[in-house]
Image: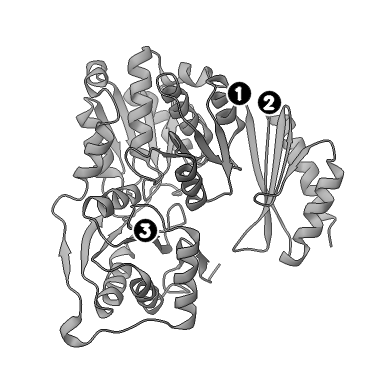
Amino acid sequence: MDYLIMSVSGLRGVVGGALTPEVALRYAAAFARLAPAGPLLVGRDSRPSGLMVQEAVLAGLHASGRNTWQAGIVPTPTLGVLVRKYQAAGGLMISASHNPPEYNGIKLFAPEGRVVPAPVGQQVLEAYRRGQWEWAAAHRVGRDQPLSDPIGPHVEAVLALVDAAQIRARSYKVLLDANHGAGAEAGRRLLEALGCQVVLVGGTPDGQFEHPPEPTAENLAGLSPLVRQVGADIAFAQDPDADRLAILDATGRYLGEETTLALCVHHLLQTRKGPIVTNCATSRTIEELARKYDVPFFRSPVGEPHVVDLMLAKDALFGGEGNGGPIDPRVGYVRDSLVGMALVLEAMAQTGLPVAALAEQLPRYEIVKTKVPLEPGKVREALDRLERHFSDARADRLDGLRLDWPDRWLLVRPSNTEPICRIIAEARTEADARQLAQQATELLVEVK
């Protein structure tokens, strides 16, 4: 896909293809024109192209007259913490998240330390497309200042969430697969501060991924035997910018990307009460936990900015997305793998149970994800067809079409970047979820 993937939170593309230094420079300049007055923070993940993209971004910002603080290689949630700590006017995170190595991208941060809200992102996108930027005179060109310990404030904020002494007393052996991403150093420092014996895999943040970067069961299959070999109590796997977390138990069993958020929510709701927010593509497990503990539950459209908007509106205790992205407002309004690690370890320490037993306590569902080609002009007709066919379900058009039954649900939503529809089905058994996804696929294929 050699074209720019552009959204209200940023852009991504293949380096040397659609994502060129000129694109990065001008996009940064468009953001500089619209951001509030003050210095801007810049960070990047570990991809080899990151330094080049960073230099282009800094050139665009400095040429626009903006001073910058440079964080270097840091997790995406770390940049959010730093934006707030230094009271920056905003931030730019250079990362393509879980995309393949040839990709890179730029994610925009608001002064509140969160990904920019959709209206702000849309303004930047329009300014970029219209060529609306302003170059500064020589005496107003911005300057850069590197930060001495960019990771420290984030680690300290996460440590403050949990009873660190209680975790230290357990001396857990933890395997951390950073996959040569930006979370290696932050993850190691956090786990060592929690008294863990850390086995770090892919600890050099050079972007030389040892397996595909998205932390799915298929991509982490090679990690399972290593968990058993080193005798780890638990294994954590991060994506390249460390905003997502997957978990394997002591046997090397992958617990599912939806399990990370569920474990955190279950642990928190046993001692604290407050609204919970997820997106409409996240497992029903979270909704059932909210019902069990009698707290409000809300769903947003898919996408971190939408989740954060709703968390702020509802003064949420906790939130996140089911792709392994927990969000704790006490640290920041950004998906955060470090938050997930700390809360899961605290749950283990407080209960004395292994993570496998904690996962067994959760409401059980199986989720299936697939996609089908569909031209944008046919989407409304296709969704109408699905709603008519599944007339016994409760329909919701918050984001695409979500259909709910007492024991299962189906979400069909068009991609913003490709002529496809994504299908997510969840049910009590994998067979039922696959059957539901297959029914939806067949109905969509029939739409010509």
Location of mark 2 (residue): 428
| Mark positioned earlier in the residue sequence (2 or 3) | 3
| Mark positioned earlier in the residue sequence (1 or 2) | 1
Which mark is nearer the camera, 1 or 3? 3
Location of residue 104 by image quarter:
bottom left
1 and 2 marks in contact (CB < 8 Å): yes
**Cα–Cα gap, marks 1 and 3:** 36 Å
**Badge 2: few (under 14), some or many (20 or more) residues near its Cα, within 10 Å?**
some
| Mark positioned earlier in the residue sequence (1 or 3) | 3
Q: Quadrant of the N terminus?
A: bottom right
- Percent from the top left, x then y, of residue 203? 27, 44
Location of residue 343 by image quarter:
top left
Q: Which type of secondary structure does the marked residue at label 1 adopt?
A: loop
Q: Quadrant of the C terminus?
A: bottom right
Q: Residue at x 77, y 36 (%)?
A: 435
**Relative vertical location of residue 180 with respect to residue 116 in this rendering, above or below:** above
Work out which residue is located at the far top of the displayed protein and give it.
352
Work out which residue is located at the far bottom of the displayed protein and give it.
137
Q: Amino acid at mark 2?
A: Arg
Q: Amino acid at mark 3?
A: Phe
Residue 403 falls left or right of residue 91:
right
Location of mark 1 (residue): 364
**Cα–Cα gap, marks 2 and 3:** 38 Å
**Cα–Cα gap, marks 1 and 2:** 7 Å
1 and 3 marks in contact (CB < 8 Å): no
Q: Is residue 324 visible?
A: no
2 and 3 marks in contact (CB < 8 Å): no
Q: Is residue 60 visible?
A: yes
Q: Which type of secondary structure does the marked residue at label 2 adopt?
A: loop
**Badge 1: few (under 14), some or many (20 or more) residues near its Cα, within 10 Å?**
few
**Relative vertical location of residue 144 with respect to residue 285 in this rendering, above or below:** below
Location of mark 3 (residue): 109
